[in-house]
Each structure stands twice: as C-alpha cells, then as structure tokens.
Amino acid sequence: MRHLSYLLVLAGCFGAAIWLEPILRVNVLRRWRRLLLTVVPVVLVFVLWDLAAIAAGHWHFDPAQTTGVVFPGGLPLDEVLFFVVVPVCAILGFEAVRAVLRRPAGDEPAGDGSAGGG
Amino acid sequence: MSYTAAALLGALVAVLLDLFVLKVQLVRRAVFWATYPIIITFQLLSNGFLTGRNIVMYDPGAILGLRIAYAPVEDLIFGFALVLLTLDLWVWWGRRGVQRTPAAGDGSRLLSRINAGKIKAGQNKTGKIKTGKIKR
C-alpha cells in the first residue's frame, strides 16, 4: 500500500477537480483533442526539466512510496503522471471559474458566449 | 544551476511566452488571477503531502530552505510555470479555433440556476436585466 502514496496524492487532486466535468459541465474532457494538444507539450517540457533536475541532484524520490516503475534517467512513472494530472486539474478549475464568473479568457468565438451573455 | 534559479527562469520563460510569444496574456486577465488562489490551495495541500511525507526529497544545497506547508518555496514558482504554460496552451488552441465549444457551463443546470440568481439580483438592484459587458 505504501508504494501507492504518490499515486494516492494524485488521485486526491484528480478527485478534487473532476466533479466539475459532470456537475458544472466545464466540458474539458469532452474537448479531449484540445486537452491532448495542451497536455502533451506540457508533459514533454516538464519531463525534460525533471530529468535535468534529477541529473543535477535537485530532488529524488522515495522508492518505497512510488510505484517502482522508473523510466531511464531515474524518472518515476508517478512523477510523469503528476504532469498529466495537475494540468488537467488546472484547466478544469480555470474553466469552472470562467463559467461561473463569465469573464473572458480571450478564446471566445466572435459575437458569442460571454460577449452578449450577461 | 540551483533549483531556485531554475524555478525563477522557468517562471520567467512562462511569463514571456504568455505575453510576447503566444500572446494569450493570461497574466493580464482577471479570470486567471481568480483561478490561481484555488489552484495554489490545492497545490499547497498536495505538495505538502509529497514533501511532508518525504515522497519527494530535495537537496538542501539546491534550495533556499524557505518552506511553506513543508514544500520548498521553489515548488510554488515551479507550479506557477507549469500552470501558466498549461492554461496558455489551452487558451491558445481555443483562439486557433480548436474545440472552442462546447464552452464551459454549456448544459449545466446548476450553472443556469446560479446565473438565474445573478440576473434576479441584478434586476433587484437596477430594475432591469443587466446586459453583461466584456470585462478584461
């Protein structure tokens, strides 16, 4: 059970945000192509950063509290999933806030949505 | 390079991308700063677990040593870069016409109830339904 510690933290994050999809209908997972186009580059960039940080000795992970699946360079699977879960949660939160506050983010279709939606 | 320098550099690059390269300019938008306190709350919680329980450990020589809820302050800066880049790309793809719809809240009964309440409140105050203007 202990080796699932990191994954449980990620599950907690995900659980705290994912209800926004069905309840507030933030439609983030429904827009999965846009989500993939966003998350994949973020994972790439931050995995590179992480590999560099591990190589430089900035941080390391407890093998007893991670899954044990480790990519070359000493990067645990858990950490890669962090860079998937956190961006997805951030987008869910962002879309929820804009839906409630009705503030534009700059990607609204012209003459639609928050422009006239009062 | 220390983690401190790397985190600051990462955040700087994210802000420069936001303002001048992707030109999404989320750091100038209210909706971003309204979202950020929520994100940072959950970040402190999850980061606190990861660092407080020693799931992730840091080289004391690579950080300042200033910690907030167990996590080195550098993690907050790292997190800012991660979240800003993520939301920038999300909005950037939307601006390019990738899946702008269904927009957030489309089809939510809870949200239409919230908004009906808002309109009612607006009616009570001004005597007529507010027509929402675009605000930054």
Image (cartoon, coloured by chain):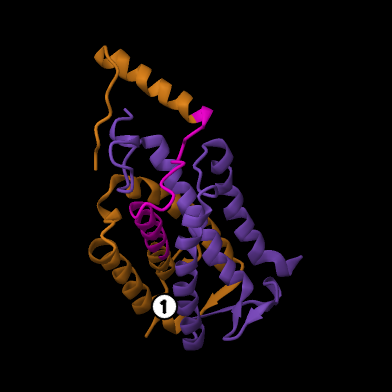
Which residue is pictured at 64% across the width and 76% down the height?
A: A62
Q: Measured along the vertical axis of the image, is residue B60 above or below residue B73?
A: below
Q: Is residue B54 visible?
A: no
- The picture places residue B69, in percent across and down from the top left corner, at 49, 60
Q: Which residue is mark 1?
A: B63
Q: Colour of chain A?
A: purple
Q: Measured along the vertical axis of the image, is residue A5 above or below residue B109?
A: below
Which residue is pictured at 44% across the width and 74% down the height?
A: A45
Whether B107 is among the magenta residues is yes
Chain painted in orange in the figure? B
- The picture places residue B37, in percent across and down from the top left corner, at 40, 49
Q: Chain of mark 1?
A: B
Q: Amino acid at mark 1?
A: Ile
The answer to which of B38 and B45 lies nearer the viewer is: B38
Residue A76 falls in image quadrant: bottom right
Q: Measured along the vertical axis of the image, is residue B136 above or below residue A4?
A: above
The answer to which of B53 and A82 lies nearer the viewer is: A82
The answer to which of B133 and B52 lies nearer the viewer is: B133
Quadrant housing the N terminus of chain B: bottom left
Which residue is pictured at 73% across the width and 67% down the height?
A: A2
Quadrant housing the C terminus of chain B: top left
Q: Which residues are magenta?
A: B82-110
B15 relative to A64 in the view: left or right: left
B106 relative to B7 in the view: left or right: right
Furthest residue toward right: A1
Q: Measured along the vertical axis of the image, is residue A50 above or below residue B43?
A: below
- The picture places residue B45, in percent across and down from the top left corner, at 53, 56
